[in-house]
Image (cartoon, rainbow, N blue to C red):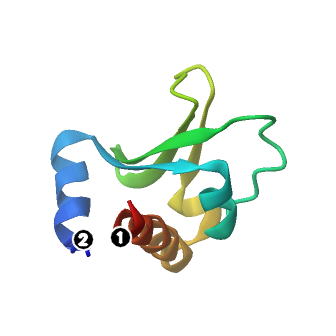
Amino acid sequence: MVKINVKKLFGKAQDEGEVFLVTLSREELERAGFDTSTFGFFETADVYLQWIGDDFRIKYIFDGDPRQSYVEKVSDVGRDVFGLIIDSYLKFLDEK
């Protein structure tokens, strides 16, 4: 079992601007509640936690192609939901 200190993870993102979280399959993203239907075909998504200006974001890069990316902001989903999204992705580290 992987034990991640989420508070330190957020602090590292603030210090470095971006922290890699995990690579998830399309199926894993769907199990976590991510709506993949609007993103066309992809097999995997690299997930990053970013600190841009004064806000956190989750960046998804599909199939390792930076031109195929999507960013989700705290303001898009709300602070509580944002935290739940991060937690749901980190739980997949236990399975890897």
**Residue 5 location (% of width, % of height):** 19, 72
Quarter of the image for the N terminus: give it.
bottom left
Quadrant of res 87: bottom left
Say whether residue 11 is left or right of residue 69: left
**Residue 48 location (% of width, % of height):** 40, 46
| Upstream in sequence: badge 2 or badge 1 | 2
Task: Identify the residue under disc 1.
Answer: 94
Q: Residue at x 69, y 62 (%)?
A: 30
**Callout 2: 10 Å neighbours few (<14), some, many (20+)?**
few
Task: Identify the residue under disc 2.
Answer: 2
Quarter of the image for the C terminus: give it.
bottom left
**Residue 59 location (% of width, % of height):** 49, 43
Residue furthest front in the image:
96
The amino acid on which the numbered mark 1 sits, given as a three-letter code, is: Asp
Q: Using the numbered discs, state the Cα–Cα distance from disc 2 to disc 1 in whole angstroms.
A: 6 Å
The one of 30 and 85 positioned closer to us in this rendering: 30
Label of residue 27 in the image: none
| Whether residue 82 is visible | yes
Q: Residue at x 77, y 39 (%)?
A: 39
Quadrant of res 42: top right
For the residues labelled 2 and 1, say whether their Cβ atoms are less than 8 Å apart: yes
Say whether residue 52 is left or right of residue 63: left
**Residue 73 location (% of width, % of height):** 54, 54
Q: Residue at x 26, y 40 (%)?
A: 17
The amino acid on which the numbered mark 2 sits, given as a three-letter code, is: Val
Q: How many marks?
A: 2
SS for callout 2: loop
Compared with 24, 43 (above or below) is above
The one of 83 and 27 positioned closer to us in this rendering: 27
SS for callout 1: helix
Quadrant of res 3: bottom left
